[in-house]
Image: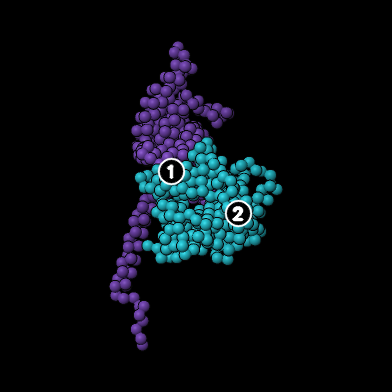
Amino acid sequence: MIQGKPHIEFRDVCAFYGAKQVLRNVTFTVPRHTVIGVIGPANSGKTTMLKTINRTLDFIGGARFTGQVLIDGESVADFRDPNELRRRIGMVFPLPVGLPLTIYENVAYAPRRRGVTAKGELDEIVERCLRQSVLWDEVKDRLQMLGTRLSGGQQQRLTLARALSLSPEILCLDEFSIAIDPVTTMRIEDVLKELRKSMTIVLVTNLVQQARRLADNTLFLWRGDLIELSPTEVAFSDKPNDKRTYDYVNGIFG
Amino acid sequence: MKENPFASTQFERRKFRRANLNKWIMFSFCAALIIPLIAILVDIFVKAAPVISLDYLWLNPANKGKEGGLWAPLVGTFYLVIGSLTLVAPVGILAAIYLNEYAKEGILNRVIGIAVTSLAGVPSIVHGLFGLGAFVLVMLPAVNSVIGSPNDRASNWQAGLLTASLTVAVMNLPVIIASAREALGGVPQSFREACWNLGATRWQTIRTIVLPNSLSGILTGVILTISRAAGETAPILFTGVTFFKFVADAGWEKIFPYNPGEPFMAMSMHLNIISNQISQMPEGMKYGSAAVLIGLILFVNSFAIILRVWLRGRKRW
């Protein structure tokens, strides 16, 4: 199933916060247009891994990483303008953040910063992204309302819509569903299956069943070590490559 | 009848009485603070009432301030405030933006933070002496050696509005930096991170999200320094203020009476001199200038409060 060059590649990546090491020699590849599910308990370096991909680790004082993270064969450390990298990668973190702007401007924020000013083009982007994040029906009549007035789950979908607004080639979702009700979550999962045709998705989740439903490959991260990376059917079978994966997935860990 | 299990116990009733008593003690301390303030204000405004009139604001002082009005010092204070604000507000706000948004967390940043806070507490007379040393004794001779001529002393710049404004600006700089940093720090970090994740640059983030949501706090800090600039005598005492300067009674020269390189009159200095340096000063004139100075500061502060309420209403979260 691996076709051509891997889209995302980690080579021997170690990440540190000061003296504390949070990722240890993580090496894996993600083929283009696949979904990789990342599971693992809290504090195992999942979020840090996402932050190395779009280099937002730079913003954390004392944080650094060694090794190489390659997007399309190009090392993220070599990007002269990290903002270019960040525009190619949509990022959704677990806490919903509605920017203090209207719903419309929240989604139009990134395109506007890129110089898109035509009203028609922006309208189109806003509608497409809000539909993809399953928020359109709820807000289409009040796009001029402040995004911060939405409920937590709606703001989370707004965050997802914002991440999609630049049509990124990689979408990283960190626990996107914790504030969203199960029915809406299922609808978003359907959208993700659709989006997979046009982008590579990194899905960090605590709901192991979500990884099972969506992911082509599943990666199990534990205390900074990559324990297992195998096709989802294998990772969730009775005989994964590492016994710890079986224990974690079946809730008999520790 | 069955006993009510939720009725107050002896212990709870005692605690309730104690809590009530504490509330009244705190209220009386609060009243003790407010009563003298009201007493002072009433005393000043009652004794000033006979002299207060539009003419009192519009006419120049005459006969060492025993007659006439307050125009010359009032307009001097106005230009001092405008001058010091134009000098300090951009510098202070940009410095605060740098410290809060760009500078990396570290020892240097923390040292600067501590220095700014301590500078804000330095007595104003120390700033006045600094202004005398830095601006009057060093900067002015340097300026004059370039633009003035040694033979014609009258064309040289003297201590005046410029040096006084610079001194007041230096005095207010730490106050503005500290209040602007606080306002910027009030914008949640998550907003910035959300923008950075979208590939917005730091400046785009500051311009579109951080500044619009911290403007009320920044402006309040700026406006509150106005009352300091208007009320303090010490920083301008050696750096340009004078008790008497001839000001025209009509025409443009009445509106723009002071050259930046010449001594000027100011309300705080005027009040200081007429209240304890000149004999047989009519009581009404002393109280009148005090009332006008207090009125000016109250007016500016109420403007700050209105602005803050208005901008807070526009806050987006």
Residue B238 appearing in the image: no
Label 2 sits on a secondary structure element that is loop
Q: Quarter-wise, where is residue B181 in the image? A: top left
Q: Where does residue A206 sit, x and y in percent of width and height?
A: 47, 60
Q: Where does residue B317 sit, x and y in percent of width and height?
A: 53, 54
**Looking at the image, is mark 2 or mark 1 earlier in the sequence?**
1
Q: Where does residue A246 sit, x and y in percent of width and height?
A: 44, 62
Read off the residue under disc 1.
A65
Tell me which residue sits at (49%, 62%) in the image. Answer: A236
Residue A7 appearing in the image: yes
A11, A189: nearer the viewer: A11
Q: Amino acid at mark 2?
A: Arg
- Number of numbered discs visible in the structure rendering: 2
Separation (CA) of disc 2 from disc 1? 29 Å
Tell me which residue sits at (38%, 23%) in the image. Answer: B137
B284 shown above or below A138: above
Chain A on-screen colour: cyan
Read off the residue under disc 2.
A196
Please give the chain letter of the residue carrying mark 2: A
Q: Which chain did the renderer colour purple?
A: B
Q: Where does residue A167 sit, x and y in percent of width and height?
A: 62, 48
Q: Give the number of the disc on residue A184.
A: none
A34, B103: nearer the viewer: A34
B265, B244: nearer the viewer: B265
Position of residue B115 in the picture relative to residue A186 (left or right):
left
Tell me which residue sits at (35%, 54%) in the image. Answer: B32
